[in-house]
Amino acid sequence: MKRIFYQTGFLFILVTILMVLPSIVQAENESPLTVFRAAVCYNIVEHEPLDIGTTFTSDVNKLYCFSEIMGAKTDTHITHIWYYMGTERARVKLRVNDSRWRTSSSKLIQKYEIGNWEIQIVDSKENIIKVLKFTITPK
């Protein structure tokens, strides 16, 4: 009788652990940071994006990725990863030092880099917290 009780108790503990474990693992992978605002734009003035868009012509020369990040409890960083046609073209690490922080990166765009672009904004653990897509069209 004692053996059945112990086996049942062990089974209960095992089932409980298996039910709780996925939520613990998921919580570890979630970022405390959120992207309040993000945009691709022609310029940034006084920490604000100007001329936001999703389509730009090949004579643009340079574009900016603006991010307003919320939720940082300690000094940390995000990274803007710029992709052209699925290939990484730039990786810019940017500090985040407050619970609400604006930051940006820029990328020179070559006249021949026509097509689809993507910028992944990732936290310090490489979790993707936002993806921005834009297109470069011929002039």
Image (tube, rainbow, N blue to C red):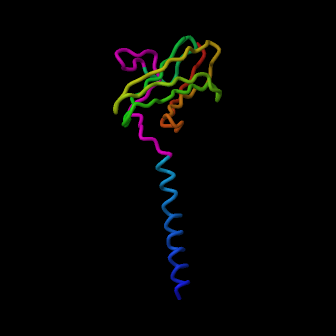
Q: Is residue 121 above or below residue 7?
A: above
Q: Is residue 9 above or below residue 138?
A: below
Give the quarter of the image for residue 113.
top right
- Residue 56 painted magenta: no
Q: Which residues are magenta?
A: 29-51
**Residue at x-position 41% and y-position 37%:** 34
Give the quarter of the image for residue 104.
top left
Left or right of 104? Residue 56 is right
Q: Is residue 9 above or below residue 43?
A: below
- Residue 41 painted magenta: yes
Q: Residue furthest bottom?
A: 1
Of the 4 image quadrants, the one containing the C terminus is top right
Residue 116 image position (x, y, % from top left): 60, 26
Label count reads: 0
Q: Main secondary structure of the magenta part?
A: strand
**Residue at x-position 46% and y-position 29%:** 77
Residue 136 image position (x, y, % from top left): 57, 20
Residue 4 image position (x, y, % from top left): 55, 84
Camera-side residue of 25 and 91: 25
Residue 11 image position (x, y, % from top left): 54, 74
Left or right of 61? Residue 70 is left
Camera-side residue of 20 and 90: 20
**Residue at x-position 52% and y-position 57%:** 22
Give the quarter of the image for residue 43.
top left
Q: Is residue 115 above or below residue 121?
A: above
Camera-side residue of 137 and 65: 65
Q: Residue furthest front?
A: 2
